[in-house]
Image: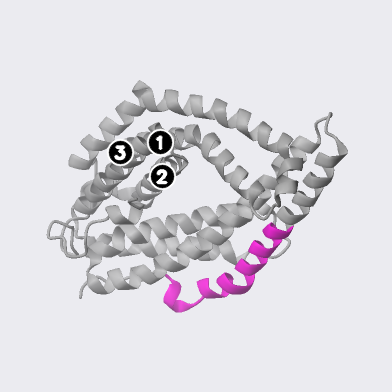
């Protein structure tokens, strides 16, 4: 099965943008790669593959993040319209994917006996998943989705960039990477063990932005920057995964609490759900504490500031 990373151009590809090429070319390549990802994921999602839904949603979010990172290099009206449509697509796909994640989280570590006791929870999720799948399929078969893909294909051939994007990649792209990492670092500095859960969720979004920006830009700056970029991407991905686990546990706990608040459940279910809540809250605490102890110090190191030098 092809991963999103397999869709990047080969490092030796002769048609990839380089340090002296205009930044507009790098933007066009990012769009072309995004269309590849979206089309591949669309085929899987239409076939009912949960991984396809995940990739389609991730690909739409990734491109939205990349367009936001390119910022003042693209026409604001054009970029704003695409970003809004990609946000709509991600939100439309979100319910089905979130339920898939919830089910996996609820089943993890549970015994067969516990899963039987939690049957009302799984039945509740299954009913919601069926409804969400129908809505998702309507979206994928609808005109709005087709028009979005068509516009992205046209944009990949001729992105609406501004004059500054005619300057070389080496001149205008490195600051975009440094900016993404600076914002991640600044947002992380204010976090503590008693910070609200949404703050860690927002930081995860910052980590994804830093990762996607680095992945898109580093290869255009030459082999040395690309090698350096891979290390930064690895760090961002670790932070993203860890804080993703935190967010999944938080959301899962909220769902269990919501179902428990409903009347009509027997004592067997309530005991199993209460035990599940304890585990979910412990998982969230452990993920949060691990970030603060291990990854917050890493973000403050000079080598992780996102400074990429073109050439080499």
Residue 176 shows in the view = no
Q: Residues within 10 Å of mark 3 (few under 14, many from 20)?
A: some
Query: From the viewer's perspective, is residue 122 above or below residue 130?
Result: below
Query: From the viewer's perspective, is residue 210 above or below residue 131?
Result: below
Furthest-front residue in view? Answer: 112
* Spot occupied by residue 249 in the image (x, y as percentages of width and height): 66, 52
Residue that label 1 marks:
45
User: Is 266 on the left-hand or right-hand side of 137?
Assistant: right
Q: Is disc 2 placed on a helix, strand or loop? A: helix
User: Over which residues does the magenta segment extend?
Assistant: 282-305
Residue that label 3 marks:
39
* Spot occupied by residue 241 in the image (x, y as percentages of width and height): 52, 59
Q: Earlier in the sequence, mark 1 or mark 2?
A: 1
Label at residue 55? 2
- Give the CA separation, mark 3 to mark 2: 10 Å
> Would you say residue 80 sits in the magenta stretch?
no
Q: Earlier in the sequence, mark 3 or mark 1?
A: 3
* Spot occupied by residue 207 in the image (x, y as percentages of width and height): 49, 59
Residue at 21% x, 35% y is 154
Q: Nearer the viewer, residue 181 or 283?
A: 283
Q: Is disc 1 placed on a helix, strand or loop? A: helix
- Answer whether labels 3 and 2 touch (C-beta < 8 Å): no
Query: From the viewer's perspective, is residue 94 above or below residue 221?
Result: above
Q: Nearer the viewer, mark 3 or mark 1?
A: 1
């Amino acid at each position: 099965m092809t991963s999103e990373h397999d869709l990047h151009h080969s490092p030796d590809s002769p048609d990839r943008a380089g340090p002296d090429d205009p930044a507009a070319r790098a933007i066009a390549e990012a769009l072309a790669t995004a269309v590849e990802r979206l089309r591949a994921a669309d085929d899987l999602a239409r076939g009912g593959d949960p991984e396809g839904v995940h990739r389609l949603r991730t690909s739409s979010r990734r491109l939205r993040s990349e367009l936001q990172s390119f910022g003042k290099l693209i026409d604001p009206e054009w970029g704003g319209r695409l970003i809004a449509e990609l946000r709509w697509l991600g939100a439309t796909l979100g319910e089905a994917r979130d339920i898939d994640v919830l089910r996996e989280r609820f089943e993890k570590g549970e015994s067969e006996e516990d899963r039987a006791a939690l049957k009302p929870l799984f039945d509740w999720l299954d009913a919601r998943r069926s409804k969400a799948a129908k809505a998702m399929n309507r979206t994928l078969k609808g005109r709005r989705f087709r028009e979005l893909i068509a516009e992205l294909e046209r944009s990949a051939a001729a992105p609406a960039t501004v004059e500054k994007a005619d300057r070389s990649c080496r001149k205008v792209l490195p600051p975009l990477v440094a900016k993404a990492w600076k914002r991640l670092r600044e947002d992380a500095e204010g976090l503590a063990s008693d910070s609200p859960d949404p703050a860690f969720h927002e930081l995860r979004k910052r980590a994804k932005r830093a990762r996607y920006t680095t992945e898109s830009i580093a290869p255009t700056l030459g082999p040395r920057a690309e090698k350096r970029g891979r290390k930064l991407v690895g760090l961002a991905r670790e932070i993203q995964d860890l804080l993703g686990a935190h967010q999944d546990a938080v959301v899962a706990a909220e769902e269990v609490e919501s179902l428990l608040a409903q009347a009509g459940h027997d004592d067997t279910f309530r005991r199993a759900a209460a035990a599940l809540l304890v585990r979910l809250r412990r998982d969230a605490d452990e993920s949060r504490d691990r970030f603060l102890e291990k990854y917050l110090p890493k973000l403050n190191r000079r080598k992780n500031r996102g400074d990429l030098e073109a050439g080499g």
